[in-house]
Image (cartoon, grey):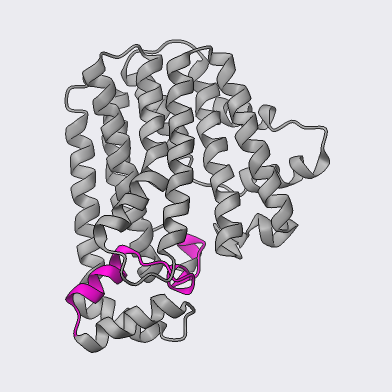
Amino acid sequence: MRAVDAMIRQRLESDVVLIRQVAEYIIAGGGKRLRPAMLLLAAGATGYGGAHHHELAAVVEFIHTATLLHDDVVDESGLRRGRKTANSEFGNAASVLVGDFLYSRAFQMMLTVDDMRVMAVLAEATNTIAEGEVLQLLNVHNADADEARYLEVVRRKTAKLFEASTRLGAILGGAAPDIEDGLARYGMHVGTAFQLIDDVLDYSGDLNETGKNLGDDLNEGKPTLPLIYAMRQGSPAQAQTVRDAIEQGGRDDFAAVLAAITDTGALDYAREQALREAGAACAAIQNLPNSNYRDSLLQLADFAVNRNH
């Protein structure tokens, strides 16, 4: 991971000062680096011994960072990881354009690997992520979005880059097709579990731990799984309260919405779905040979659902 961080800083070089400032601000803001870590572990688990895994790990982090920059502009977010978002610090225009720079730099970096399968996986992933972002936009303030529609957004917008990361590691390691597909499924399930827990923490987390204000999703009118479940299982009055909050956005009825979520056990339900996804992730890599890499992948699946930030 130190090698990946060094690669990230090296590839951020630009003679345009604002690009360096914004990119450095985002990268220095921390983050779990889960996607790069999963790529490295998948490469190690499949016996890769070269150096391209550092480059591709940096690529997936650049793609992820670009999506964050664009997301925060679309969502008009003011806080991420406990700090002001880049759009709050530098303005929307700078955030969008530096996000574009990171995407294009990522594609420049892919070329150094000189592998068409790598290019195909990353091209498909970035396209799917963009589709997921648009689907999420269509769901904003839509109280009729159901669990299946919610999960479709999660699979495309969040889980796809996790899936691409572990598949890329397997491709570098020259894994057999069944092993590669298993690692890809692992990434998809872990990514889904990760987002489910993110959505739980939006109603139960601590600002000092999550770096986000409680109820950010509700404020933006996003119908996440806890809200969908509360509408489905709550009383007519509770369902109407949640529906109104989604359609109108804001935090005015946050206490009443949180009460409905609590009364219906919506957070427990979302956690159960996350645990199912983590279990499916672990099952998907049972055919991997025993190694410290495989053990770490199993531990990451556990972390995805048992974290508090």
In the depicted structure, whether residue 279 falls above or below residue 176: below
Residue 206 picture location, percent across and down: 43, 68
User: Where, by quadrant of the figure, is residue 28 drawn?
Assistant: top right
The residue at 45%/43% (across/down) is 129
Residue 300 picture location, percent across and down: 32, 40
Side (left or right) of 14 relative to 171: right
User: Where, by quadrant of the figure, is residue 139 drawn?
Assistant: bottom left
The residue at 52%/41% (across/down) is 64
In the image shown, does 228 or 39 lie closer to the viewer?
A: 228
In the image shown, does 281 or 94 lie closer to the viewer?
A: 94
Is 162 part of what is drawn in magenta? Answer: no
Numbered circles on residues, count: 0
Residue pushed farthest bottom?
Answer: 237
- Which residues, given as a range, are shown in magenta? 208-235
The residue at 30%/14% (across/down) is 175
Residue 73 appears in the figure: yes
Residue 145 picture location, percent across and down: 31, 65
Quadrant of the rendering where the C terminus is positioned:
bottom left
Side (left or right) of 129 relative to 303: right
Residue 144 picture location, percent across and down: 30, 70
The residue at 59%/51% (across/down) is 70
Side (left or right) of 198 relative to 290: right
Residue 291 appears in the figure: no
User: Where, by quadrant of the figure, is residue 148 drawn?
Assistant: bottom left
In the depicted structure, whether residue 224 falls above or below residue 239: above
